[in-house]
Image (cartoon, helix red, strand yellow):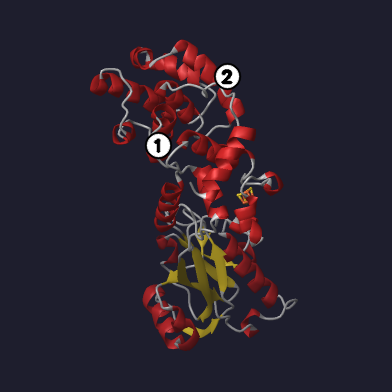
Amino acid sequence: MSDFARRLVRWQARAGRKDLPWQGTRDPYAIWVAEIMLQQTQVGTVIPYYQRFMQRFPDVARLAAAAPDDVMRLWSGLGYYSRARNLQLAARAIVARHGGRFPRALAEIERLPGIGRSTAAAIASFAFGARAAILDGNVKRVLARHFLVEGFPGEPAVERKLWSLAESLVPARGVEAYIQGLMDLGATRCTAQRPACGRCPVRATCGAHAANRVSELPAPRPRKRVPARSTVMLVLRHGADVLLEKRPVTGVWGGLWSLPEIALAADAVKDGRADVQCAIVQRFGVQVRRVEPLAAMRHAFTHFTLDIRPVLADVAAVDRRAGERGAVWLPLAEASGAALPAPVKRLLLRLAASTGGDQPSLLEEAVQDL
Ligand code: SF4
C-alpha cells in the first residue's frame, strides 16, 4: 500500500465520515442512488432527499415500475433532473437486462444510463469490494495538489495522467476505506476554497503544500483564445455631413445605423491610401478629395474582438442614390446622436469634438498598431 493510501485509510478510520445514511450497507442500489444524488449536490442537502427517495423506492424493481412523475416529484428541488430520469432508465435496464439484480461487473455497471467510470467504480468497490479507482472532481483536485499534476484536469492528456495515477494508488486491500478516505479528504479538508492543510492527513507528503502552490493547483480551465476580426470603417464626409448606413437586421449590430465598411486588408489603410480611394470610388461612386487614417480602435464582443481601422475621406459630391441603399447623409453632430454601435458613436463624438476645435485633432493621431 502506498504511503498516501496508508495515511488516508488510517485517517478515515479515525476521523472520516461513517454515519451517513448510505454508509454501512453493501446494497448496490442504495449506494448507487446516493452516488448519483451526491454528484452535483452537497451531502447536507442530499440526506433528506435520499431518505425520502429510499422510503418510496426501496429497490430497483420499485423504481423501475414507478410513474416517472412520481420519481421527478421526489427529486424536485435537488436540481439536475437528468440524473433522476437516468436513474429510472437505468433501473428499467437492470430489470430488462439483468433480471432486476444489480450487475457486479464494472463494465456492466458503466453501461447503465447516467453512470460514468468514477461512479461505477465507487458502486463496485463499496458494494462488491472491487479494486477500482475513482476520479471525480474532488479527487482530481486532491491528486493534482498532492502529486503536483500540472494542467487543467479537463484536458484529456491531464485527465489520462490523473486516471493512471488514481489507478496506481488503489490498495490491494481495504479499497472501501481508501476510497471513502479520498472522498472525505476532498470534501472536508482539500476543498476548492480555503483547504484545511493544517488538519490534512497527507500534508507531510503533499507537493503543493511543500511548494506553497496549493492555490495554484489544479490549474483552472484555460481561457479560450478569442478570435480577432478586422474591418476598415469609413467616415465619408461631405461638408458637415457624414454617411451612415443601416446594418442588416441579422448579424453583428443588427438593425443599427453605422459607418460603411469596406473589405480591405488593414495594411491598405496604413500604406495604400490609393487602394482605399479606389474602393470608395468603386463602391459609392463619389469623388474623393482626401483620405486620412484615424486612430485604430478595438471592440470586444463575446466571441471575437473587432479591430477597427477608421478612415476619414472627404468627398467632393454626395451619391444621390445613397437613400435608396438604406443610407443617409447627416450632419456630424446629429449622426453621433443616432442609435449607433458604441465604438462608432465614440469615433463620431471624438471627430465632432476634434473638428469643434476643443480637442487635439484626430487627424494628428498616429494610426496605432493593434
Ligand atoms: S496538504 Fe492541503 S493541498 Fe495538500 S492534500 Fe492536504 S489539504 Fe490538500
Q: Which residue is labeled 1 in the image?
A: 121
Question: Front-most of 346 and 308?
Answer: 308
Q: Position of residue 172 (x, y in %)?
A: 42, 41
> What's the amino acid at mark 2?
Pro
Query: How many residues crowd mark 2 within 10 Å: few (<14), some (14–19), many (20+)?
Result: few
Asked if residue 105 lies left or right of residue 127, the reply is left
In the image, the residue with mark 2 has its CB under 8 Å from the nearest atom of ligand 1 = no
Q: Residue at x 52, y 24 (%)?
A: 23
Q: Quadrant of residue 47?
A: top right
Of the two numbered discs 1 and 2 in the rendering, the one whose residue sits closer to the viewer? 1
Residue 13 bears which disc, if any?
none
Q: Quadrant of residue 17?
A: top right
Q: Residue at x 66, y 60 (%)?
A: 212
**Residue at the right extreme, as displayed:** 358
Asked if residue 295 lies left or right of residue 358, the reply is left
Q: Position of residue 303 (x, y in %)?
A: 48, 58
Q: Is residue 190 above or below residue 368?
A: above
Work out whether residue 16 can be spotted.
Answer: no
Q: Earlier in the sequence, mark 1 or mark 2?
A: 2
Q: Is residue 36 above or below residue 207?
A: above
Q: Label 1 vs label 2: CA separation?
A: 25 Å
Q: Position of residue 266 (x, y in %)?
A: 46, 78
Q: Position of residue 216 (x, y in %)?
A: 61, 58
Discs 1, 2 touching: Cβ within 8 Å: no
Classify mark 2: helix, strand or loop.
Answer: helix
Question: Front-most of 364 and 9?
Answer: 9
Q: Quadrant of residue 7?
A: top right
Question: Front-most of 241 and 214?
Answer: 214
> What's the amino acid at mark 1?
Ala
Q: Residue at x 46, y 71 (%)?
A: 231
Q: Which residue is labeled 2 in the image?
A: 48
